[in-house]
């Protein structure tokens, strides 16, 4: 469908990650055939730009701002957008740009990007819902979330389900792939994430230690960085590994039978998608936001992260799985993970654009 008038679409993102960068690059590439669409990405200066080795047109056109400053669109050499994708609601710069957009063009639409997940009994979230409905909801027309848990939360926040879109996140599927057969994998549990209290890593270590497993046969690997000092736990069957590049991490996923994430809270947990793409059996806290997308009875064990005994039972059940069960789980993990990719994320993006402009870009 030809587009008669220019359409300005701007996408803001806080602390641009590599996986989001490559998704936005994919979106930009697919919009190139629509000459009248002006797509721009705005990100905060918090990012260390040197971490990106790429030098291409898309990268050079990224707009970097200070999240604490207020900007006019003219300050960024941009016109008022027709559609503004706003990253969260806590950054002064993004909030101000959103406010200006509505003031200058009442027909402009604001799309909230949210990765929060539904937590039924958490008081902070219950109060947040009330505050959002009273003070913030009227600012946003649509919302884009990672998955079902985020969709449920946004319905609680007052959005109609027809205005909520999913598949906001996906991992680097060209890097994270199922490469090693189950029978050739090591008997090890792999954790990937921040070493912080919310990730529940101390309880994970204590539970694993209490099993008194054969040190030559079973291992727990913890990959990441954070406030907690875990180096004292380095033993023959517990290994602490610093942050790894995606290629090295993919190799580690493929070497491991099991991936474990015991978080007390995890809004989405992109590492679950990475591990699933690599065919790992999953041991997940029930509070991980992506449980419903990537886990079922065939490929996972779900446990209560507040219960050490429940976590221990999870370990024991995993250890006693047969080769046949692990083989089935491997195929199931890859199958479930395959639905989350750049193409399907772009389809959701396209649905939003179509809903606002009646222009079909997919």
Image: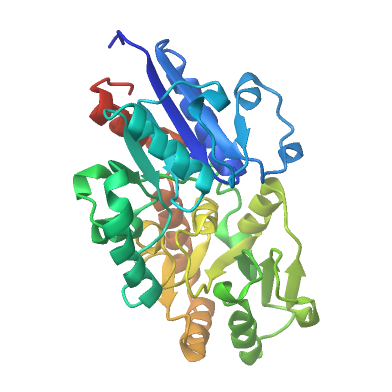
Residue at (35, 25) in percent of width and height: 82
Q: Is residue 307 left or right of residue 339?
A: right
Along the line of sight, which residue is nearer the eye, 279 or 5? Answer: 5
Q: Is residue 39 left or right of residue 242?
A: left
Residue 297 appears anywhere in the view: no
Q: Is residue 31 left or right of residue 199?
A: left
Residue 294 appears anywhere in the view: yes
Residue at (41, 24) in percent of width and height: 80
Looking at the figure, which quarter contains the C terminus?
top left
- Residue 246, image x, y percentages: 66, 47
Task: Answer above or below: position of 272 versus 53.
Answer: below
Along the line of sight, which residue is nearer the eye, 271 or 107? Answer: 107
Instruction: Count the marks.
Output: 0
Residue at (24, 43) in percent of width and height: 163
Residue at (62, 67) in percent of width and height: 190
Name the image colouring. rainbow
Task: Answer above or below: position of 287 versus 109.
Answer: below
- Residue 296, image x, y percentages: 35, 65
Along the line of sight, which residue is nearer the eye, 86 or 301? Answer: 86
Task: Answer above or below: position of 92 versus 108.
Answer: below
Q: Quadrant of residue 299?
A: bottom left
Task: Answer above or below: position of 175 versus 241.
Answer: above
- Residue 101, image x, y percentages: 38, 32
Q: Quadrant of residue 70?
A: top right
- Residue 1, image x, y percentages: 27, 12
């Amino acid at each position: 469908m030809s587009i008669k008038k220019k359409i300005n679409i701007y996408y803001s993102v806080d602390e641009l990650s590599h996986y989001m960068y490559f998704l936005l690059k994919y979106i930009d590439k697919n919009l190139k055939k629509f000459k009248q669409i002006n797509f721009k990405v705005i990100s905060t200066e918090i990012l260390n730009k040197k971490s990106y080795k790429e030098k291409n047109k898309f990268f050079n056109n990224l707009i970097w701002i200070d999240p604490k400053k207020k900007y006019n669109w003219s300050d960024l050499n941009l016109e008022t957008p027709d559609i503004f994708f706003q990253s969260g609601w806590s950054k002064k710069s993004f909030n101000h740009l959103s406010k200006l957009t509505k003031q200058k063009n009442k027909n402009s639409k604001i799309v909230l990007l949210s990765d929060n997940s539904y937590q039924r009994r958490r008081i902070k979230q219950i109060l947040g819902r009330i505050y959002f409905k009273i003070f913030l909801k009227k600012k946003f027309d649509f919302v884009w979330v990672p998955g079902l848990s985020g969709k449920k939360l946004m319905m609680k926040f007052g959005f109609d389900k027809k205005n909520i879109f999913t598949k906001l996140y996906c991992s680097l599927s060209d890097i994270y792939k199922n490469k090693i057969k189950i029978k050739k994998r090591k008997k090890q549990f792999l954790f990937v994430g921040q070493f912080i209290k919310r990730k529940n890593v101390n309880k994970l270590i204590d539970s694993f230690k209490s099993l008194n497993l054969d040190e030559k046969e079973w291992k727990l690997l913890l990959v990441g960085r954070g406030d907690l000092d875990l180096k004292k736990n380095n033993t023959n069957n517990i290994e602490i590994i610093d942050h790894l590049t995606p290629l090295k991490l993919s190799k580690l996923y493929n070497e491991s039978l099991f991936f474990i994430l015991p978080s007390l809270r995890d809004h989405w947990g992109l590492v679950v998608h990475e591990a699933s793409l690599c065919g790992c059996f999953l041991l997940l806290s029930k509070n991980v936001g992506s449980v419903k997308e990537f886990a079922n009875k065939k490929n996972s064990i779900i446990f209560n992260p507040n219960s050490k005994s429940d976590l221990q039972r999870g370990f024991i059940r995993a250890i006693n799985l047969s080769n046949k069960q692990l083989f089935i789980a491997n195929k199931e993990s890859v199958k479930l993970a395959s639905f989350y990719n750049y193409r399907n994320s772009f389809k959701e993006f396209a649905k939003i654009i179509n809903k606002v402009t009646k222009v079909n870009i997919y």
